Image (spheres, rainbow, N blue to C red):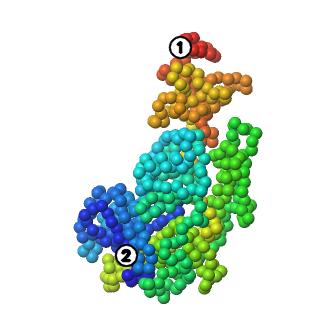
Amino acid sequence: MTDDFAKLTLTLDMPQEVEVVRATIVEGMSKLTHATLELSAAHHLELEGVLEKDAVVDFVSVEAPPRRWTLRVGHVDFVGIQESSLRFVANLYPAMWLLKLTTNTRKFRNMSAEQIISQVLSAQNVAHRFELTRPTEVRKYCAQYRETNLDFVHRLLEFEGIYYTFEPDGTVVFGDTSEDGAPTAGTAAFDLVESAGLSFHDVGIFRFKKGRRVASGAATVNDYNWKTPKVSLLSSKAAAEDGELEVYDYPTGFRKPDQGTRLAALRLEALRVPARYVEGQSNVTSFEPGRRFTFGGITHPRFAGDYVLTEVTHRYVDRAFVDQQDGEGLSYDNEFSAIPRKVAFRPPLVTPRPEIAGCHTATVVGPEGEEIHTDKHGRYRAQFHWDREATGTDQDSRWLRNTQEVQTGMVLARVGWEQSIAYVDGDPDRPFGFARNINGQMVPEYAQPTNKTRMTMKSPSYPSAGG
């Protein structure tokens, strides 16, 4: 699309004015927006001064409502001089992008995924809002282990089947019902048109591809709950097509049968998203991920239907700064991906759960003055050495099971002991203890190596009396 069809501008918190020469903006459901802008400026830009600052991109079109992206400057480069102007390339991202630059190891207790995500985003001043139709269940214990904040948030969202999009002011909006998305702003019904005949007043789709691909058609989840060892947690869900192509996951990360039923359905929906797709090219500037549009019905009734946009790549060029022969006019087009409205969008499970391959040690803790702090299962609480937010109380950890050497034996860990900790399937959320360790404070009962030939078993007195 050419002529004075649209104008894209960039507003930065700086005195120098810039013109946008070229722009590519990629946005998608459950994807961070990335805008690459080539800029023209009469004077040198203070590059360091704009980093992490707000960058507002406005797109004003003749035939469609305006678009706005509120982003942050991630990096900017000086690339040379052309047509007597200084040229720069700026890469812009949403505020949520900064989460990938922060790594943490910490725990969350008695919080839902929604509450955890909200806490992480709020700590980095990321505006957000949840528009969910179902609650996320409370997690008694959830560990973020050597993950970026972004990976941690993505992992929770993928598990819960929650996607996100961005509003014009940069607010992150979380949702779980893509079929209820708002229609494309302005005109929301389009038919196929020929690009060769378009004038700058024409808005339409000039390439439309609708396809079907083979995709996994069954999801089976499974886990084990030691509190109910005889209760099967196996749960499956199959689609009408490709049902023989099963994805089986163990351990999935749930403890109750009804949770497995819900997770199997969510996993299946995520697996089926790629099965039916639409791809195309247009000059509809209002195309936006998460919004829906209607296609066909007149010239192409076979492909008629409602579709939800999942990804849009916008391309813009101001030829006044590019074409020396014909220095007037603007051009814009986009490429888009969409799914049928009746297909529920779920983010794919692509963010790996961290795995702890080896062991940790932790210190057994309990209420002040208590030497043996346990429950009916003989468990104990421990404070992990990596937990920098711990306060030294028994509330700093979860109850941990402890392996016993013999069938009828029971050794209870005492407050102050350093215990070795392993993890079921390497899962940071599922620790258990298996041995006491000697350290600089908890020395052997008998001096070593003087008593190196002795093998002992000793039960300390309670309360402690030194014997």
Q: Position of residue 130 (x, y in %)?
A: 52, 55
Q: Position of residue 275 (x, y in %)?
A: 65, 67
Residue linked to disc 1: 447
Q: Which residue is at 43% across, 70% downward?
A: 67
Q: Amino acid type of disc 1?
A: Ala
Task: Say which of 265 and 38 sits in front.
Answer: 265
Residue linked to disc 2: 7
> As displayed, is residue 296 above or below residue 432?
below
Left or right: 337 with respect to 24? right
Residue found farthest to the bottom: 197
Indicate the secondary structure of the residue bearing disc 2.
strand
> As displayed, is residue 361 above or below residue 156?
above
Q: CA distance from mark 2 to mark 1?
A: 82 Å
Q: Position of residue 144 (x, y in %)?
A: 52, 44
Q: Amino acid type of disc 2?
A: Lys
Query: Are the residues tagged 2 and 1 within 8 Å (C-beta)?
Result: no
Disc on the earlier residue, 2 or 1: 2
Where is the C terminus found, in terms of image quarters? top right
Q: Which residue is at 53% across, 75% downward?
A: 188
